Image: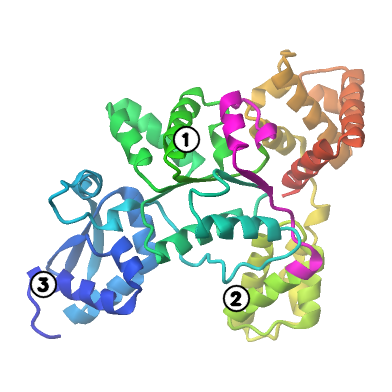
């Protein structure tokens, strides 16, 4: 190790990172950070606790490697939130140096998800094209961009790809949140009396991305705050990107004025990938992992794992790990043995408790309402859906189902089953929604 003072230790790490990563990413993640080094301990100051996730995922390992190399021995890395870094970024005096965008990238944006490694197929090509258009012209077209579809179909990949594309172009005033985190931040701001700071944090960004926006349904205060944030950004042509597991009109317990605004831009449905796309995804992931995937094994996985891209990736990861640890070749026999539980998942039993829990969560009601005596539409309708799903997915009789829904008569269950079946037959949109619910219940 060369003789490097404690005071210049972080500067050497920063200089090394600057020589290794693109300028836009250095500005976004490293430039404005400061750190203290002493006794083989490096404490890095960051603008927020959310910033830590992205920094560690993107550059944590490399920072550790450089630090250990400089010190000549292991170095302990820790992170300390310094709120002044964030406040300086949005309140810097006009006579000062412009604030670095490092503190303006707010939230974890996964650098692995890009347009280049997104496999386009018939079920997602429209969403892919729309996302690319937004990345090319943020705030100008398709505002808001609202992507919806089931779990593991690529929504999160696409919105991260948009963010990564914008960062590479130097657009770094981005706030990335899940609906749950946005809600929790608001609750914390109300408790701490920092609501004004909360509002300013979101209304001064160039791009606001909310993943799983359906989480705010039924939460009046959160919806009210998001409504005003939406308006403030929309009026000055700042890009808003939202994802959900269902379309705006299918979100129950959502303010009508918010539902209307979600439809102002472009609402795009991402569908489950077809067989050819699933094969292409497997081929792409195998290539990235440095794995030669037997053609028959690829067809087996693509044919049996049909609804969720993440499950495809998980299956490939499991096969690769088992092959590496055992030295076995990944052939059909090996794949069927290692993935026997996953490949036979379609015959896994579904119990009524899981159905009630998942349907209640889908419609944002308390699971206790499934067995309550309430007959209001927002309670009765999810209950009927759950009864129908129980009849479809289990071997329970109508009287048994009725007993598990608050001791209802079998004729009540029969009425619910017939009603939902009739709605599926008469409405393609409703049938599509029920397919999503049934797939969710099978997971």
Q: Quadrant of residue 170?
A: bottom left
Q: CA distance from mark 3 to mark 1?
A: 44 Å
Q: Which residue is mark 2?
A: 321
**Element marked by disc 3:** helix
Disc nearest the viewer among 3 and 1: 1
Q: Residue at x 32, y 61 (%)?
A: 28
Q: Which residues are magenta?
A: 248-277
Q: Is residue 255 visible?
A: no
Q: Which mark is residue 230?
A: 1
Asked if marks 3 and 1 touch (Cβ < 8 Å), the reply is: no
**Element marked by disc 1:** helix
Q: CA distance from mark 2 to mark 3?
A: 42 Å
Q: Does residue 272 belong to the magenta stretch?
A: yes
* Residue count near mark 3 (Cα–Cα under 10 Å), binned few <14, some 14–19, many ≥20: few
- Where does the image place residue 284, in percent across and percent down from the top left? 65, 75
Left or right position of 231 against 155: left
Q: Which residue is mark 3?
A: 8
| Label 1 or label 2, whichever comes before in sequence order | 1
Q: Is residue 327 above or below residue 286?
A: below
Left or right position of 85 against 239: left
């Amino acid at each position: 190790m060369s003789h490097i003072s404690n005071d210049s230790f972080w500067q050497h790490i920063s200089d090394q990172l600057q020589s290794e990563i693109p300028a836009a990413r250095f500005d976004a993640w490293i430039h404005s950070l400061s750190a203290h080094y002493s006794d083989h301990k490096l404490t890095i100051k960051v603008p927020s606790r959310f910033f830590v996730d992205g920094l560690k995922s993107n550059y944590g390992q490399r920072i550790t490697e450089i630090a250990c190399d400089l010190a000549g021995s292991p170095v302990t890395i820790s992170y300390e939130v310094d709120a002044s870094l964030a406040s300086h970024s949005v309140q810097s005096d006009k006579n000062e140096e412009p604030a670095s965008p490092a503190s303006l990238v707010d939230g974890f944006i996964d650098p692995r998800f890009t347009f280049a490694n997104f496999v386009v197929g018939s079920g997602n090509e429209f969403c892919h094209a729309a996302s690319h258009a937004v990345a090319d012209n943020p705030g100008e077209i398709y505002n808001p961009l609202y992507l919806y579809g089931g779990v593991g179909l690529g929504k999160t990949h696409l919105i991260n790809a948009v963010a990564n594309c914008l960062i590479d172009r130097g657009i770094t005033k981005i706030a990335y949140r899940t609906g749950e985190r946005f809600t929790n931040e608001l609750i914390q701001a109300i408790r701490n009396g920092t609501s004004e700071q909360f509002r300013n944090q979101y209304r001064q960004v160039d791009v606001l991305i909310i993943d799983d926006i359906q989480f705010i349904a039924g939460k009046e205060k959160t919806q009210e705050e998001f409504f005003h944030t939406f308006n403030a950004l929309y009026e000055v042509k700042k890009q808003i990107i939202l994802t959900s597991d269902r379309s705006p009109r299918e979100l129950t317990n959502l303010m009508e004025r918010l539902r209307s605004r979600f439809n102002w831009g472009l609402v795009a449905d991402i569908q489950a990938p077809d067989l050819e796309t699933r094969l292409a995804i497997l081929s792409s992931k195998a290539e990235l992992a440095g794995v030669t995937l037997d053609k028959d094994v690829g067809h087996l996985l693509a044919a049996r794992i049909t609804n969720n891209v993440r499950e495809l990736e998980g299956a490939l990861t499991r096969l690769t790990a088992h092959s590496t640890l055992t030295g076995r070749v990944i052939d059909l026999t090996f794949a069927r043995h290692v993935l026997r539980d996953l490949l036979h998942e379609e015959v896994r039993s579904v119990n009524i408790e899981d159905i009630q829990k998942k349907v209640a969560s889908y419609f944002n009601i308390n699971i206790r309402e499934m067995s309550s005596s309430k007959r209001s539409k927002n309670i009765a309708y999810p209950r009927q859906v759950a009864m129908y799903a129980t009849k479809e997915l289990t071997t329970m009789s109508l009287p048994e189902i009725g007993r598990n829904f608050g001791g209802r008569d079998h004729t009540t269950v029969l009425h619910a089953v017939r009603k939902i079946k009739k709605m599926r037959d008469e409405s393609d949109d409703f049938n599509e929604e029920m397919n999503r619910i049934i797939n969710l219940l099978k997971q």
